[in-house]
Amino acid sequence: MTDHHSEKGGRWARNYIGYFIKWIILSLVTGAVCGVTGGAFARCVSAATQFRSANGWMIFFLPAAGLLIVLIYRKLKISGVGTNAVFDSAAEGDSLKFRLIPAIFVGTVLTHLFGGSAGREGAALQIGGDIGNHIGQLFRFDEEDKKIATMTGMAAFFAALFGTPVTAAVFVATVISVGLVKHAALVPGMIASVLASEVAVWMGAAPVRFQIEAPEVSPLMMGKVMILAAACGLVSAVFVMALHYTERFYERFFKNAYVRVAVGGAFIIVLTLLAGCPDYNGAGVDVIARAIGQGQARPWDFAVKILFTALTLEAGFKGGEIVPTFYIGATFGCAFGQLLGIPAGFAAAVGFAAMFAGVTNTMITSILLAAEVFGGAGLPYFGVACMLSFVFSGYNGLFSSQVIVFSKLREGRVMKKVNHRVDLAKGDKTFYSR
Protein backbone atom coordinates (compact mmCIF):
# COMPACT_ATOMS: atom_id res chain seq x y z
CA MET A 1 0.00 0.00 0.00
CA THR A 2 2.81 2.37 0.92
CA ASP A 3 4.70 1.58 -2.29
CA HIS A 4 1.53 2.14 -4.30
CA HIS A 5 0.93 5.56 -2.73
CA SER A 6 4.59 6.47 -3.13
CA GLU A 7 4.51 5.54 -6.81
CA LYS A 8 1.27 7.49 -7.31
CA GLY A 9 2.70 10.50 -5.44
CA GLY A 10 5.89 10.37 -7.47
CA ARG A 11 3.94 10.32 -10.74
CA TRP A 12 1.83 13.25 -9.52
CA ALA A 13 4.97 15.23 -8.65
CA ARG A 14 6.60 14.49 -12.01
CA ASN A 15 3.49 15.62 -13.89
CA TYR A 16 3.27 18.88 -11.99
CA ILE A 17 6.97 19.61 -12.24
CA GLY A 18 6.92 18.77 -15.94
CA TYR A 19 4.02 21.11 -16.63
CA PHE A 20 5.55 23.83 -14.48
CA ILE A 21 8.79 23.71 -16.44
CA LYS A 22 6.84 23.65 -19.72
CA TRP A 23 4.79 26.73 -18.74
CA ILE A 24 7.87 28.59 -17.49
CA ILE A 25 9.63 28.07 -20.82
CA LEU A 26 6.48 29.01 -22.75
CA SER A 27 6.02 32.11 -20.59
CA LEU A 28 9.57 33.35 -20.97
CA VAL A 29 9.69 32.85 -24.72
CA THR A 30 6.22 34.27 -25.33
CA GLY A 31 6.71 37.17 -22.94
CA ALA A 32 10.00 38.17 -24.57
CA VAL A 33 8.67 37.91 -28.14
CA CYS A 34 5.41 39.70 -27.34
CA GLY A 35 7.24 42.35 -25.32
CA VAL A 36 9.57 43.22 -28.17
CA THR A 37 6.84 43.06 -30.82
CA GLY A 38 4.37 44.91 -28.60
CA GLY A 39 6.89 47.62 -27.77
CA ALA A 40 7.63 48.13 -31.47
CA PHE A 41 3.92 48.16 -32.30
CA ALA A 42 3.13 50.70 -29.56
CA ARG A 43 5.88 53.02 -30.77
CA CYS A 44 4.69 52.74 -34.38
CA VAL A 45 1.10 53.60 -33.41
CA SER A 46 2.33 56.48 -31.25
CA ALA A 47 4.53 57.82 -34.06
CA ALA A 48 1.64 57.52 -36.54
CA THR A 49 -0.66 59.42 -34.18
CA GLN A 50 1.88 62.20 -33.60
CA PHE A 51 2.53 62.58 -37.32
CA ARG A 52 -1.19 62.77 -38.12
CA SER A 53 -1.76 65.30 -35.32
CA ALA A 54 0.93 67.53 -36.79
CA ASN A 55 -0.38 67.09 -40.35
CA GLY A 56 -4.15 67.42 -40.41
CA TRP A 57 -4.28 66.95 -44.18
CA MET A 58 -3.52 63.22 -43.68
CA ILE A 59 -7.21 62.60 -43.01
CA PHE A 60 -8.00 63.16 -46.70
CA PHE A 61 -6.05 60.01 -47.59
CA LEU A 62 -8.03 57.77 -45.22
CA PRO A 63 -10.08 56.17 -48.05
CA ALA A 64 -6.87 55.31 -49.92
CA ALA A 65 -5.43 53.78 -46.74
CA GLY A 66 -8.58 51.70 -46.40
CA LEU A 67 -8.23 50.41 -49.95
CA LEU A 68 -4.66 49.37 -49.17
CA ILE A 69 -5.77 47.55 -46.02
CA VAL A 70 -8.44 45.59 -47.90
CA LEU A 71 -5.92 44.77 -50.63
CA ILE A 72 -3.40 43.47 -48.09
CA TYR A 73 -5.98 41.21 -46.48
CA ARG A 74 -7.20 39.97 -49.88
CA LYS A 75 -3.69 39.22 -51.14
CA LEU A 76 -2.80 37.40 -47.93
CA LYS A 77 -6.12 35.50 -48.12
CA ILE A 78 -7.19 36.40 -44.58
CA SER A 79 -10.21 38.61 -45.29
CA GLY A 80 -12.66 38.38 -42.41
CA VAL A 81 -10.11 36.89 -40.01
CA GLY A 82 -10.03 38.85 -36.76
CA THR A 83 -10.26 38.70 -32.98
CA ASN A 84 -13.08 36.16 -33.01
CA ALA A 85 -10.88 33.73 -34.94
CA VAL A 86 -8.26 34.04 -32.19
CA PHE A 87 -10.95 33.41 -29.56
CA ASP A 88 -12.01 30.30 -31.46
CA SER A 89 -8.40 29.13 -31.59
CA ALA A 90 -8.04 29.61 -27.84
CA ALA A 91 -11.26 27.64 -27.30
CA GLU A 92 -10.76 24.88 -29.88
CA GLY A 93 -6.99 24.66 -30.35
CA ASP A 94 -7.12 25.54 -34.05
CA SER A 95 -4.02 26.80 -35.83
CA LEU A 96 -3.74 30.43 -36.91
CA LYS A 97 -2.17 31.86 -40.04
CA PHE A 98 1.12 33.61 -39.33
CA ARG A 99 0.46 36.18 -42.05
CA LEU A 100 -2.28 37.64 -39.85
CA ILE A 101 0.47 39.27 -37.73
CA PRO A 102 1.92 41.64 -40.37
CA ALA A 103 -1.55 42.32 -41.77
CA ILE A 104 -3.13 43.51 -38.51
CA PHE A 105 0.10 45.32 -37.54
CA VAL A 106 0.22 47.33 -40.76
CA GLY A 107 -3.56 47.74 -40.97
CA THR A 108 -3.81 49.20 -37.47
CA VAL A 109 -0.89 51.59 -37.99
CA LEU A 110 -2.41 52.80 -41.29
CA THR A 111 -5.80 53.34 -39.62
CA HIS A 112 -4.21 55.50 -36.91
CA LEU A 113 -1.89 57.30 -39.32
CA PHE A 114 -4.77 58.54 -41.48
CA GLY A 115 -7.30 59.30 -38.77
CA GLY A 116 -9.64 56.35 -38.44
CA SER A 117 -11.28 55.96 -35.03
CA ALA A 118 -9.90 52.75 -33.56
CA GLY A 119 -7.99 51.27 -30.67
CA ARG A 120 -5.13 48.80 -30.34
CA GLU A 121 -6.42 45.73 -28.52
CA GLY A 122 -7.70 44.08 -31.70
CA ALA A 123 -4.11 43.96 -32.84
CA ALA A 124 -2.96 42.98 -29.34
CA LEU A 125 -5.20 39.93 -29.10
CA GLN A 126 -4.66 38.90 -32.72
CA ILE A 127 -0.87 39.36 -32.85
CA GLY A 128 -0.35 37.97 -29.36
CA GLY A 129 -2.64 35.01 -29.92
CA ASP A 130 -0.98 34.25 -33.24
CA ILE A 131 2.50 34.44 -31.70
CA GLY A 132 1.48 32.15 -28.84
CA ASN A 133 -0.22 29.76 -31.24
CA HIS A 134 2.89 29.42 -33.37
CA ILE A 135 5.16 29.02 -30.35
CA GLY A 136 2.86 26.18 -29.30
CA GLN A 137 3.27 24.64 -32.74
CA LEU A 138 7.05 25.11 -32.55
CA PHE A 139 7.12 23.28 -29.22
CA ARG A 140 4.89 20.56 -30.73
CA PHE A 141 2.17 21.05 -28.13
CA ASP A 142 -0.95 18.98 -28.35
CA GLU A 143 -4.33 20.62 -28.98
CA GLU A 144 -5.07 21.36 -25.31
CA ASP A 145 -1.66 22.85 -24.57
CA LYS A 146 -1.80 24.88 -27.78
CA LYS A 147 -4.92 26.59 -26.40
CA ILE A 148 -2.90 27.65 -23.36
CA ALA A 149 -0.09 28.89 -25.61
CA THR A 150 -2.56 30.99 -27.63
CA MET A 151 -4.06 32.53 -24.49
CA THR A 152 -0.60 33.19 -23.07
CA GLY A 153 0.30 35.17 -26.18
CA MET A 154 -2.96 37.13 -26.03
CA ALA A 155 -2.30 38.10 -22.41
CA ALA A 156 1.35 39.00 -23.00
CA PHE A 157 0.68 41.31 -25.94
CA PHE A 158 -2.25 42.96 -24.15
CA ALA A 159 0.03 43.63 -21.18
CA ALA A 160 2.77 44.97 -23.44
CA LEU A 161 0.42 47.59 -24.90
CA PHE A 162 -1.44 48.66 -21.76
CA GLY A 163 1.09 47.94 -19.02
CA THR A 164 -1.50 46.01 -16.98
CA PRO A 165 -0.13 42.46 -16.54
CA VAL A 166 -2.58 41.28 -13.85
CA THR A 167 -5.55 42.57 -15.83
CA ALA A 168 -4.23 40.97 -19.02
CA ALA A 169 -3.73 37.52 -17.51
CA VAL A 170 -7.15 37.41 -15.82
CA PHE A 171 -8.89 38.98 -18.82
CA VAL A 172 -7.75 36.25 -21.20
CA ALA A 173 -8.56 33.48 -18.70
CA THR A 174 -12.13 34.73 -18.21
CA VAL A 175 -13.25 36.54 -21.37
CA ILE A 176 -13.92 33.60 -23.69
CA SER A 177 -16.46 31.83 -21.46
CA VAL A 178 -18.03 34.36 -19.09
CA GLY A 179 -18.52 32.73 -15.71
CA LEU A 180 -15.75 30.17 -16.13
CA VAL A 181 -12.03 30.61 -15.46
CA LYS A 182 -9.38 28.89 -17.58
CA HIS A 183 -7.18 28.22 -14.55
CA ALA A 184 -4.43 26.51 -16.53
CA ALA A 185 -3.84 29.75 -18.46
CA LEU A 186 -3.36 31.94 -15.38
CA VAL A 187 0.21 31.06 -14.38
CA PRO A 188 1.82 31.16 -17.85
CA GLY A 189 -0.34 34.15 -18.75
CA MET A 190 0.73 36.06 -15.65
CA ILE A 191 4.44 35.35 -16.01
CA ALA A 192 4.43 36.18 -19.72
CA SER A 193 2.40 39.35 -19.11
CA VAL A 194 4.77 40.68 -16.45
CA LEU A 195 7.79 40.01 -18.67
CA ALA A 196 6.16 41.47 -21.80
CA SER A 197 5.07 44.57 -19.90
CA GLU A 198 8.58 45.18 -18.59
CA VAL A 199 10.18 44.60 -22.00
CA ALA A 200 7.71 46.99 -23.67
CA VAL A 201 8.42 49.70 -21.07
CA TRP A 202 12.16 49.20 -21.64
CA MET A 203 11.50 49.76 -25.35
CA GLY A 204 9.71 53.05 -24.64
CA ALA A 205 6.04 52.01 -24.49
CA ALA A 206 4.23 53.96 -21.78
CA PRO A 207 1.88 51.99 -19.48
CA VAL A 208 -1.66 53.35 -19.03
CA ARG A 209 -1.69 55.13 -15.66
CA PHE A 210 -3.72 58.01 -14.19
CA GLN A 211 -3.53 59.79 -10.87
CA ILE A 212 -6.96 60.40 -9.37
CA GLU A 213 -8.46 61.65 -6.13
CA ALA A 214 -11.31 59.47 -4.90
CA PRO A 215 -13.99 60.81 -2.55
CA GLU A 216 -14.48 59.22 0.85
CA VAL A 217 -16.85 56.25 0.80
CA SER A 218 -20.33 57.34 1.85
CA PRO A 219 -23.85 56.05 1.20
CA LEU A 220 -24.78 59.16 -0.79
CA MET A 221 -21.75 59.04 -3.07
CA MET A 222 -22.10 55.28 -3.49
CA GLY A 223 -25.69 55.79 -4.63
CA LYS A 224 -24.57 58.35 -7.19
CA VAL A 225 -21.85 56.03 -8.49
CA MET A 226 -24.40 53.23 -8.78
CA ILE A 227 -26.61 55.40 -10.98
CA LEU A 228 -23.62 56.30 -13.16
CA ALA A 229 -22.61 52.62 -13.40
CA ALA A 230 -26.07 51.51 -14.51
CA ALA A 231 -26.06 54.23 -17.15
CA CYS A 232 -22.62 53.05 -18.34
CA GLY A 233 -24.00 49.54 -18.76
CA LEU A 234 -26.80 50.86 -20.95
CA VAL A 235 -24.41 53.00 -23.00
CA SER A 236 -22.15 49.97 -23.52
CA ALA A 237 -25.13 48.08 -24.96
CA VAL A 238 -25.86 51.04 -27.25
CA PHE A 239 -22.23 51.01 -28.43
CA VAL A 240 -22.37 47.31 -29.31
CA MET A 241 -25.68 47.72 -31.15
CA ALA A 242 -24.30 50.74 -33.02
CA LEU A 243 -21.48 48.55 -34.30
CA HIS A 244 -23.95 45.87 -35.36
CA TYR A 245 -26.37 48.17 -37.18
CA THR A 246 -23.52 50.01 -38.90
CA GLU A 247 -22.21 46.65 -40.12
CA ARG A 248 -25.65 45.82 -41.52
CA PHE A 249 -25.88 49.26 -43.15
CA TYR A 250 -22.55 48.80 -44.94
CA GLU A 251 -23.37 45.25 -46.04
CA ARG A 252 -26.73 46.29 -47.43
CA PHE A 253 -25.68 49.36 -49.40
CA PHE A 254 -21.96 48.73 -50.10
CA LYS A 255 -21.46 45.03 -50.71
CA ASN A 256 -18.03 45.41 -52.33
CA ALA A 257 -15.29 45.55 -49.67
CA TYR A 258 -13.27 48.17 -51.56
CA VAL A 259 -16.27 50.44 -52.03
CA ARG A 260 -17.29 49.94 -48.40
CA VAL A 261 -13.94 50.96 -46.93
CA ALA A 262 -13.63 53.95 -49.28
CA VAL A 263 -17.12 55.16 -48.37
CA GLY A 264 -16.36 54.64 -44.67
CA GLY A 265 -13.22 56.73 -45.01
CA ALA A 266 -15.21 59.45 -46.77
CA PHE A 267 -17.75 59.45 -43.94
CA ILE A 268 -14.97 60.03 -41.41
CA ILE A 269 -13.52 62.90 -43.49
CA VAL A 270 -16.90 64.67 -43.64
CA LEU A 271 -17.59 64.14 -39.95
CA THR A 272 -14.12 65.37 -39.01
CA LEU A 273 -14.67 68.57 -41.00
CA LEU A 274 -18.09 69.02 -39.37
CA ALA A 275 -16.63 68.46 -35.90
CA GLY A 276 -13.97 71.08 -36.55
CA CYS A 277 -11.38 69.24 -34.46
CA PRO A 278 -9.47 65.93 -34.50
CA ASP A 279 -10.68 64.81 -31.05
CA TYR A 280 -12.66 61.90 -32.46
CA ASN A 281 -9.96 60.52 -34.76
CA GLY A 282 -7.47 57.86 -33.75
CA ALA A 283 -7.62 56.34 -30.27
CA GLY A 284 -8.27 59.64 -28.48
CA VAL A 285 -5.89 59.01 -25.58
CA ASP A 286 -5.44 62.76 -25.08
CA VAL A 287 -9.21 63.19 -24.70
CA ILE A 288 -9.30 60.39 -22.12
CA ALA A 289 -6.46 62.05 -20.20
CA ARG A 290 -8.26 65.39 -20.31
CA ALA A 291 -11.49 63.89 -18.99
CA ILE A 292 -9.80 62.05 -16.11
CA GLY A 293 -7.01 64.49 -15.32
CA GLN A 294 -8.84 67.79 -15.81
CA GLY A 295 -12.49 66.79 -15.59
CA GLN A 296 -13.24 68.21 -19.03
CA ALA A 297 -15.49 66.60 -21.63
CA ARG A 298 -18.25 67.83 -23.89
CA PRO A 299 -21.68 66.24 -23.23
CA TRP A 300 -21.81 64.81 -26.77
CA ASP A 301 -18.24 63.48 -26.96
CA PHE A 302 -19.18 59.89 -26.09
CA ALA A 303 -21.97 59.73 -28.70
CA VAL A 304 -19.82 61.18 -31.48
CA LYS A 305 -17.02 58.73 -30.64
CA ILE A 306 -19.49 55.85 -30.92
CA LEU A 307 -20.44 57.08 -34.39
CA PHE A 308 -16.82 57.58 -35.54
CA THR A 309 -15.74 54.17 -34.24
CA ALA A 310 -18.66 52.27 -35.76
CA LEU A 311 -18.18 53.90 -39.15
CA THR A 312 -14.43 53.21 -39.07
CA LEU A 313 -14.25 49.61 -37.91
CA GLU A 314 -17.31 48.25 -39.68
CA ALA A 315 -16.06 49.73 -42.96
CA GLY A 316 -13.00 47.48 -42.81
CA PHE A 317 -10.34 49.54 -41.05
CA LYS A 318 -8.29 47.81 -38.34
CA GLY A 319 -7.57 48.40 -34.68
CA GLY A 320 -10.06 47.52 -32.01
CA GLU A 321 -12.85 48.82 -29.82
CA ILE A 322 -11.31 48.83 -26.33
CA VAL A 323 -9.52 52.20 -26.36
CA PRO A 324 -12.62 53.81 -27.94
CA THR A 325 -14.53 52.11 -25.11
CA PHE A 326 -12.25 53.84 -22.59
CA TYR A 327 -12.86 57.13 -24.43
CA ILE A 328 -16.65 56.64 -24.43
CA GLY A 329 -16.66 55.65 -20.77
CA ALA A 330 -14.41 58.48 -19.61
CA THR A 331 -16.23 61.23 -21.50
CA PHE A 332 -19.69 59.92 -20.63
CA GLY A 333 -18.70 59.48 -16.99
CA CYS A 334 -17.22 62.97 -16.86
CA ALA A 335 -20.32 64.65 -18.33
CA PHE A 336 -23.04 62.58 -16.64
CA GLY A 337 -21.18 62.29 -13.35
CA GLN A 338 -21.11 66.05 -12.92
CA LEU A 339 -24.90 66.14 -13.23
CA LEU A 340 -25.07 63.62 -10.37
CA GLY A 341 -22.68 65.63 -8.22
CA ILE A 342 -19.69 63.31 -8.59
CA PRO A 343 -16.28 65.01 -9.00
CA ALA A 344 -15.77 65.16 -12.76
CA GLY A 345 -12.34 63.53 -12.97
CA PHE A 346 -13.31 60.70 -10.66
CA ALA A 347 -16.58 60.17 -12.54
CA ALA A 348 -14.54 59.89 -15.76
CA ALA A 349 -12.34 57.24 -14.15
CA VAL A 350 -15.41 55.28 -13.00
CA GLY A 351 -16.86 55.47 -16.52
CA PHE A 352 -13.51 54.31 -17.95
CA ALA A 353 -13.59 51.05 -15.95
CA ALA A 354 -17.36 50.50 -15.93
CA MET A 355 -17.70 50.79 -19.70
CA PHE A 356 -14.95 48.18 -20.12
CA ALA A 357 -16.93 45.83 -17.85
CA GLY A 358 -20.06 46.40 -19.91
CA VAL A 359 -18.67 45.78 -23.40
CA THR A 360 -16.39 42.86 -22.52
CA ASN A 361 -18.56 41.14 -19.85
CA THR A 362 -15.50 40.82 -17.63
CA MET A 363 -16.51 42.12 -14.21
CA ILE A 364 -13.55 40.93 -12.11
CA THR A 365 -11.04 41.89 -14.79
CA SER A 366 -12.46 45.41 -14.90
CA ILE A 367 -11.99 45.84 -11.15
CA LEU A 368 -8.37 44.72 -11.53
CA LEU A 369 -7.99 47.16 -14.42
CA ALA A 370 -9.15 50.00 -12.19
CA ALA A 371 -6.70 48.95 -9.48
CA GLU A 372 -3.74 48.85 -11.89
CA VAL A 373 -4.57 51.98 -13.87
CA PHE A 374 -5.71 54.18 -10.96
CA GLY A 375 -3.46 52.82 -8.22
CA GLY A 376 -6.20 51.37 -6.02
CA ALA A 377 -7.84 54.69 -5.14
CA GLY A 378 -11.61 54.47 -4.68
CA LEU A 379 -11.63 50.69 -5.17
CA PRO A 380 -15.03 50.12 -3.45
CA TYR A 381 -16.62 52.53 -5.92
CA PHE A 382 -14.95 50.85 -8.88
CA GLY A 383 -16.01 47.43 -7.62
CA VAL A 384 -19.68 48.38 -7.41
CA ALA A 385 -19.54 50.28 -10.70
CA CYS A 386 -18.03 47.38 -12.66
CA MET A 387 -20.51 44.91 -11.21
CA LEU A 388 -23.54 47.07 -12.06
CA SER A 389 -22.33 47.93 -15.56
CA PHE A 390 -21.74 44.23 -16.19
CA VAL A 391 -25.35 43.48 -15.24
CA PHE A 392 -26.99 46.42 -17.01
CA SER A 393 -25.15 45.76 -20.29
CA GLY A 394 -27.34 42.69 -20.69
CA TYR A 395 -26.09 39.95 -22.98
CA ASN A 396 -24.26 42.29 -25.34
CA GLY A 397 -20.56 42.21 -26.07
CA LEU A 398 -17.82 43.16 -28.50
CA PHE A 399 -16.70 39.59 -29.17
CA SER A 400 -19.27 37.43 -30.97
CA SER A 401 -17.35 34.24 -30.08
CA GLN A 402 -17.77 34.98 -26.37
CA VAL A 403 -20.13 32.68 -24.48
CA ILE A 404 -22.21 33.77 -21.48
CA VAL A 405 -22.31 30.68 -19.26
CA PHE A 406 -24.48 31.89 -16.36
CA SER A 407 -27.45 34.23 -16.15
CA LYS A 408 -26.63 37.72 -14.92
CA LEU A 409 -29.84 38.00 -12.90
CA ARG A 410 -30.87 34.53 -11.76
CA GLU A 411 -29.26 31.28 -10.72
CA GLY A 412 -28.77 29.00 -13.69
CA ARG A 413 -26.96 28.60 -16.98
CA VAL A 414 -27.84 30.26 -20.25
CA MET A 415 -24.86 29.00 -22.33
CA LYS A 416 -25.40 31.42 -25.20
CA LYS A 417 -23.08 33.55 -27.26
CA VAL A 418 -23.27 37.26 -26.62
CA ASN A 419 -25.80 39.50 -28.33
CA HIS A 420 -28.75 37.19 -27.79
CA ARG A 421 -31.68 38.58 -25.83
CA VAL A 422 -32.52 36.22 -22.95
CA ASP A 423 -36.15 36.13 -21.79
CA LEU A 424 -35.76 34.90 -18.23
CA ALA A 425 -39.48 34.25 -17.83
CA LYS A 426 -39.96 32.23 -21.01
CA GLY A 427 -36.49 30.86 -21.38
CA ASP A 428 -36.17 31.73 -25.08
CA LYS A 429 -33.23 33.50 -26.64
CA THR A 430 -33.43 35.79 -29.66
CA PHE A 431 -30.46 37.11 -31.61
CA TYR A 432 -30.77 40.86 -31.91
CA SER A 433 -27.38 42.48 -32.25
CA ARG A 434 -23.75 42.05 -33.12
Image (spheres, helix red, strand yellow):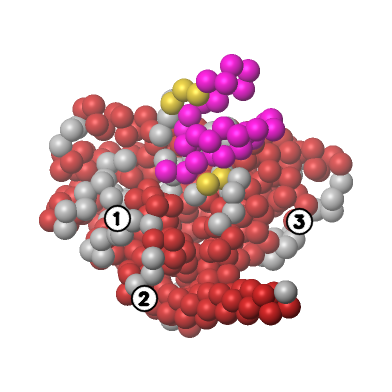
Image: magenta residue range? 401-428
Image vertical order of residue 152 relative to residue 203, above or below = above
Does the CB distance between marks 1 and 2 fall below 8 Å?
no
Residue 65 rendering spot, x and y as whole percentages? 20, 54
Q: Position of residue 321 (x, y in %)?
A: 43, 49
Disc 1 and disc 2: Cα gap in Å? 34 Å
- Marks 3/1: CA distance? 35 Å
Who's the residue at 78% across and 52% down the image? 380
Residue at 47% from the left image edge and 37% from the top image edge:
417
Disc 1 crowd, CA 10 A, few/some/many (<14, 14-19, 20+) = many
Mark 3 vs 1, N-terminal side: 1
Badge 3, how many Cα within 10 Å: few under 14, some, many 20+? many
- Residue at screen point 44% across, 61% down: 144
In the rendering, which numbered label is found on residue 378? Answer: 3
Q: Which mark is residue 139?
A: 2
Q: Which mark is residue 111?
A: 1
Sooner in the amino-acid sequence: mark 3 or mark 2: 2
Type of the residue with mark 1: Thr
In the depicted structure, whether residue 213 falls above or below residue 430: below
Q: Kindly check if marks 3 and 2 are in contact, taking CB atoms under 8 A apart as contact.
A: no
Disc 1 element: helix
Compared with 251, 151 (above or below) is below
Front: mark 1 or 2:
2
